Amino acid sequence: MSSTGYGPRSNAKLQRLLFDGDETKYELWEARLLGYLQTIKLKKTILSSAPLEEEGDEAKNEESYAELIQLLDDTSLSLVMRDAAGDGRKALKILRDHYASQGKPRIIALYTELTSLEKGTSETVTDYLIRAERSIMALKNAKETLSDGLVIAMILKGLPDSYKPFVVHITQSTSEITFAMFKSQLKSFEETEKFNCKPKTDQVMKTESPSFSASSYVTCYACGRKGHIMKDCPDKTKSETSKWCSYHKSTTHSDSTCRRHQRKDQEATKVKQATFGGQFDVLKRVDGNFNPAKHYMELADGTRRNNVALKGGDAELVSIADENGKYVKAVLKDALFRPTYPQDIIGTLRLHEMCDGNADRKC
């Protein structure tokens, strides 16, 4: 039983509370120590600066000293055993002065450590931030004032080149960002990078081992032999005269004479003409003042690009049926022509604007 009557103390628990004399770990150890003293009702006593007037206070102070020295290495114990024997408050002050000094040499050393931070190649963002916060907290405990902007700049400086898009996004952002928000965004970027670096399925399937060869499973439709496809067939005579329809998987006719292929091509052409009306006909009014070089688009990763949208104006979209089943022409104001994008994009705000323009109908 402990002297306070709170039951037996676990040796494993006390083992985790032991201090090994490492100066860089002192703040972490003191936080654990104070948490432990709180559980046995001695934290208030060891941190109090009030005079020990009552007999009970003196006894608790001696008890806090007894608990404290059980958790110190030999070097740390030698610092307090003579000058603060039986005095828990004084012993803690001596340890703070020695391991967490507010003197100028230690402050300079902490600033040097913080400004020379570099993320290791095998180090996670979480471990990197913990190293940085250790120095930050030590400086704040030494009464040094560190703004969030200064701390963020020091941490950004130590990131590798693979984090350059994130660095550019943070440095060019005009909105205020706190250190807590910065840590969250940095961790999110790391998770995104991990996902993007995973091998794709087609890349995995291309990997061949000595015991497996994909070429052994393919058959040439020109000569009938395995190990190659028709376009790589060594028998050029057969490959040039052989017929193959990729849609019907048949050698009775070729892709060029397949009616199904011709029908699909015709349908695709009709859809393209109906949808786009040529490359620029979709814009019924072209803005002559639109300058592609001055128009920037910001992507999801924070990067900005110009010369993506080549023209601007009003676009007449396909007809839209109202609640009565009547079709009306929809015109999108200030539309952009972006030939490099594989699909049309419309924002919900623009859609509401179109609906508002037809107040007598519900969209």
Image (cartoon, rainbow, N blue to C red):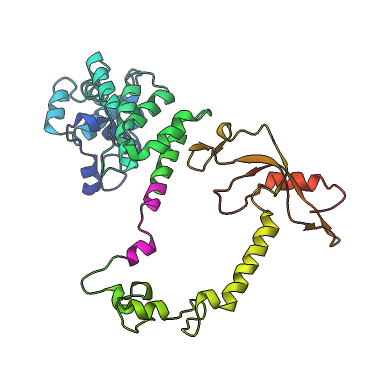
For residue 228: magenta?
no
Nearest the viewer among 174 and 354 is: 354
At 42% across and 43% down in the image, what residue appears? Answer: 189
Q: Quadrant for the C terminus, please.
A: bottom right
Magenta range: 192-206
Q: Where 362 sits versus 254, above or below?
A: above
User: Does residue 40 appear in the picture of this structure?
Assistant: no
Residue 346 horizontal side relative to residue 296, left or right: right
Q: As displayed, is residue 25 above or below residue 319? A: above
Q: Nearer the viewer, residue 53 or 35?
A: 35
**Main SS class of the magenta portion in the image:** helix
As rendered, which of 213 and 193 lies closer to the eye?
Answer: 213
Q: Give x and y (percent) for residue 224.
A: 35, 84
x and y percentages locating residue 122 in the rendered image: 26, 44
User: Is 201 covered by the magenta stretch?
Assistant: yes
Quarter of the image for residue 92 reads top left
Which residue sits at x=25%, y=15%? 103
In depth, the one of 171 and 24 nearer the eye is 171
* Horizontal relation, residue 318 to residue 6: left or right: right
